[in-house]
Image: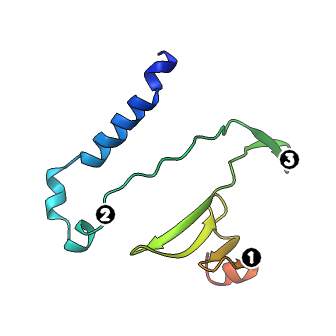
Amino acid sequence: ATKAAFGIDVVQASVEAAVASQDKTWIKENWQLSQVPRGVVVQPLYRTDLRREVGDNEPEEVRPLELRILVLFGTVVGAVITNRPFELWVTKDGAVQLWLPEDLKARGV
């Protein structure tokens, strides 16, 4: 495919099609889910084919550092590092809570 085949017009048309899509099963959803405004999140792609050596010299995939923001009913409640959710919690005010591994083990996490 040519570079033009993946231009902004193609992406915009794809996003518009996704937002306007319908499925007959959606009429059976409870009213709370039907009240969520439709929307689209667009993010850049990252290279994930990088490797690093760990422990016994076996390569491990290196993922980009992403902060996953958790939102309930339009209000930010906190955030976690996507590929390490049990290491820390970021509060809605931006404070960082580090989890102790022994506390997580004691709680079965």
Tag shown at residue 56: 3
Q: CA distance from mark 3 to mark 2?
A: 48 Å
Most foreground residue, 61 or 102: 61
In terms of sequence position, does the residue under pointer 3 or pointer 1 come before the other? 3
Relative image position of residue 64 (x, y in whole percent): 68, 49
Horizontally, is 59 left or right of 86 in the view? right
Verify CB contact (< 8 Å) between mark 3 and mark 2: no
Task: Report which residue position mark 1 lands on.
Answer: 101
Please provide percent x and percent y for residue 53. Answer: 84, 44
Label 1: state its secondary structure: helix
User: Is the residue under label 2 in contact with that under label 1 (CB below 8 Å)?
Assistant: no
**41 sits to left or right of 96:** left
Q: Residue at x 59, y 78 (%)?
A: 92
| Identity, as a three-letter code, of the amino acid under mark 2 | Pro
Mark pair 3, 1: CA separation: 22 Å
Residue flagged by tag 1: what amino acid is it? Pro
Mark 3, secondary structure of its residue? loop
Which disc number belongs to residue 37?
A: 2
Type of amino acid at the residue the image marks with label 3 = Asp
Figure coloring:
rainbow
Residue 82 sits in quarter: bottom right
Q: Position of residue 47 (x, y in %)?
A: 66, 37
Q: Residues within 10 Å of mark 2 (few under 14, many from 20)?
A: few
For the point 36% across and 41% down, the residue is 15
Q: Position of residue 3 (x, y in %)?
A: 51, 19
Q: CA distance from mark 1 to mark 2?
A: 38 Å
Q: Within 10 Å of the Cα at label 1, are there few (<14), some (14-19), or many (20+) other Cα atoms?
A: few
Extreme residue in the front direction: 9
Residue at screen point 48% across, 47% down: 42
Q: Residue furthest top?
A: 2
Q: Depth-wise, is mark 1 or mark 2 nearer the camera?
A: 2
Is 53 in front, or is 95?
95
